[in-house]
Image (spheres, rainbow, N blue to C red):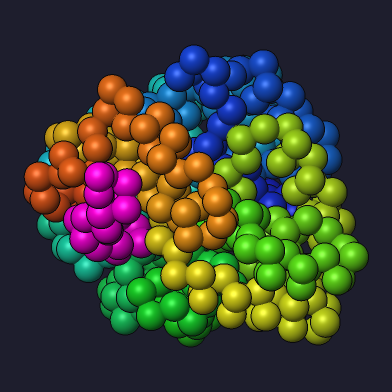
Amino acid sequence: MGNRFFDSVKKNFGFGFMRLPMKDNEVDYEETIQMVDAFMENGFNYFDTAHGYLGGKSEIALRECLVKRYPRDTYIIANKLTSNYFEKEEDILPCFNAQLEACGVEYFDFYLMHAQNADLFEIYKSCNAYETAFALKEQGRVKNVGLSFHDKAEVLDRILTEYPQIDVVQIQFNYADYDDSGVESKKCYEVCVKHDKPVIVMEPVKGGNLVNLPESAQSVFDELKGGSNASYALRFAASYQNVMMVLSGMSNMEQMEDNISFMKDFKPLTEKEFEAVWKVCDIFKAQDLIACTFCKYCVDGCPMSISIPDLFSDMNCIRRYVGWNGEWHYNMHTAGKGKASDCIECGLCEETCPQHLPIRKLLSDVKGVFEAS
């Protein structure tokens, strides 16, 4: 069955290649192949990657685990043009060609301008990045041009007004961020509806935060006697009319099997399930957790090699679980790496954070909790 927005896309659930199973800091191809096969065998075909995912290993894993093993017309690949890999217009085509080579294909089904915000949009405009992508579409080397987005709704509205040729928009959309003033999931979705653009959803479980819920929130879902926590989060996103695809960055076969179980024959949330989701949302927000999704964009450029997402995870666990052995985990996450106190406040992390977190302040808070003695 084709997706109602794009006939070549099957169903409404995609495999994000950003959080693959790892073994000794390398992609575990054996388990990834099992996941790819299960995904394809159950009627899905949409795969999402980017040049910088997993330190450059994502595209290659896609080639080895999917492209070399299946006919080209049986799967869909979405890739992205990331600002780290070009400084001027002349750099874009070499980058694009390198991505094709890394993935082992001759065209991309979707090519997205990556992580657009107000500042990056101006850089992409100055380099004619959108125009280059539209030209690639005319040549047949790209089937659809889109953007992934991390900013306020008014910025998205401006981009879609300036470039009405855009085919699709990828936004962060989940029940925790629905009314969040920083992410503006609902408002961004409404802008897409206004411009009649199909929506691809990223971070439907907020980097796993909507899977590992506080006990009081867990009891709400347990009362439904239904699916997993992930099922309510993914089905929430997929229940909205303009959503054509919900991505999940799965890290093992267990997650793949769980997601397939409720997305193979997708059913929107019922009214009762929506009510439960909003109750869980209220509880989740009351925890005062750091809204990190573990994308690790902040880690790549950190001059002090601070594993920022891990330290934020330690902080969240301290707040969420009474008696949790946070000091042991903090020492493990800083072994051979920078501590929170090593931050030189250069701000590079905040420039790349899709969640717009005040990372420097938060690291200071982490320091106060774990390095007070």
The answer to whether residue 365 is magenta is yes
Q: Over which residues does the magenta segment extend?
A: 353-373
Query: How many numbered discs sit on the rendered protein?
Result: 0
Residue occupying image coordinates x 55% and y 51%: 323
In the image, is 368 to the left or to the right of 52? left
Residue occupying image coordinates x 72% and y 64%: 218
Q: Is residue 60 visible?
A: yes
Instruction: Say which quarter of the image contains residue 122.
Output: bottom left
Give residue 314's position: percent from left, percent from top. 43, 47
Give residue 129's position: percent from left, percent from top. 24, 51
Give residue 82's position: percent from left, percent from top. 30, 44
In the image, is 74 to the left or to the right of 335? right
In the image, is 347 to the left or to the right of 264? left
Q: Quadrant of the C terminus?
A: top left
Residue placed most toward the observer, 191 or 146: 191
Residue placed most toward the observer, 322 or 138: 322
Residue placed most toward the observer, 325 or 28: 325
Give residue 362's position: percent from left, percent from top. 27, 58
Residue occupying image coordinates x 82% and y 82%: 272
Residue occupying image coordinates x 49% and y 48%: 110
Q: Residue furthest front?
A: 373
As drawn, 153 above or below 104: below
As drawn, 287 above or below 272: above
As drawn, 346 above or below 300: below
Q: Residue furthest right?
A: 225
The answer to whether residue 277 is magenta is no
Instruction: Say which quarter of the image contains residue 7.
Output: bottom right
Instruction: Say which quarter of the image contains residue 77.
Output: top right
Q: Is residue 99 visible?
A: no
